[in-house]
Amino acid sequence: MKEFVESFYNASKAKRSAIPRIDELPYYITWPLVYVLKQGNVKPVWLSVISFLGGVLFLFTLVWKPEALNPLIPSLLLLIRILLDYADGQLARYAFQTSNLGALYDLIADFFFVFLLYISIAWVVIVAEELPLWVTISLTITAFISHLTTATVSSFLNRLASDKAHTQQEIAMEFVRVFPNDFPEEPRYSKKLSVMNSLFLFTWRVISIYVLAILVGNRQIKYRQFSAHLSAFFEYSIHLFVLLFIVFLGHSFLYFLAFEILALATCVALLLFLRIISFK
């Protein structure tokens, strides 16, 4: 127990100088689970796999006779997906098992889950809401772009606020560069890393390039803590918590698509606001 208290303190003390952001709160929830998993020698990759499979099962419940299911079932599956997505990275850091390959697995799994999520939502909306096909496709594509774009903005601004050791340009480059080989002596690892880097090129990286070109440019962002708090509402898993709330209440997925479009509009307004008050 003493080790748990000390590890929790060390993990959270860096954040005590300011009010915790909304996107940081789930880490405090999952930390006891991470401690237990560490004592059981559970590997972070196992959590990543279970998290992704939980997400796939959740999507299956959406498209396969959703009216026959209690909303509690898909809600629990989505909650497992969200919490384990937080916990796998925590466990990797706590157990000193971090790697660039693991980071790429997580990023690409997130991307493909979101991709499949919006395909599933489009299908449900077409069947349940009887909207014209072109309206459904337009709404879904806009929501998909919103989810990825706003999550990238949040990730960059949060990293910028917390990382004092690197310049803004160095942090921006980390979002678009190839992940370096941290275990070159292992051929199998190197091959997997190369494949994951290739996949990353066509997923999050292209989104990052687009977003950072608009957000950063050659100018420096000021008021970084303030910007991080504002952008915390766009963090990747916050979107899924909103979806969880909608699924649990049994509301139409049109509410979620509307939320995503509103999030994109709000994010654009935030970027314009930052240019006015923060850039020189």
Image (cartoon, helix red, strand yellow):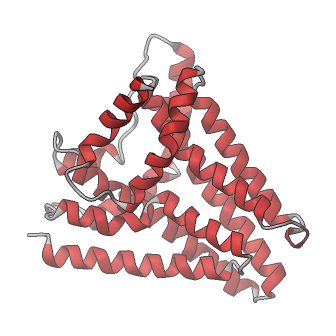
Hey, which quadrant is residue 98 in on the image? top left
Q: Position of residue 64 (x, y in %)?
A: 88, 64
The vertical placement of 124 against 110, above or below, is: below
Q: Position of residue 4 (x, y in %)?
A: 43, 29
Q: What is the total number of numbered labels drawn onto the structure image?
A: 0
Q: Evaluate whether residue 200 shows in this view.
A: yes
Q: Nearer the viewer, residue 147 or 230?
A: 230
Task: Give the residue at x 48% y 40%.
Answer: 31
Q: Position of residue 278 (x, y in %)?
A: 14, 70
Q: Evaluate whether residue 197 shows in this view.
A: no
Please indicate whether residue 239 sits to the left or right of residue 216 in the image. Answer: right
Please indicate whether residue 259 sits to the left or right of residue 181 in the image. Answer: right
Task: Give the residue at x 59% y 43%.
Answer: 84
Work out which residue is located at the far front of the displayed protein and give it. 1
The vertical placement of 66 against 220, above or below, is: below
Task: Give the residue at x 32% y 57%.
Answer: 20
Q: Could you tell me which quadrant the N terminus lies in?
A: top left
The vertical placement of 244 against 264, above or below, is: above
Work out which residue is located at the far top of the displayed protein and give it. 185
Q: Nearer the viewer, residue 31 or 55?
A: 31
Q: Could you tell me which quadrant the C terminus lies in?
A: bottom left
Q: Nearer the viewer, residue 28 or 159?
A: 28
Q: Position of residue 243 (x, y in %)?
A: 62, 68
Task: Give the residue at x 79% y 59%.
Answer: 73
Please indicate whether residue 109 sits to the left or right of residue 103 in the image. Answer: right
Q: Nearer the viewer, residue 18 or 60?
A: 18
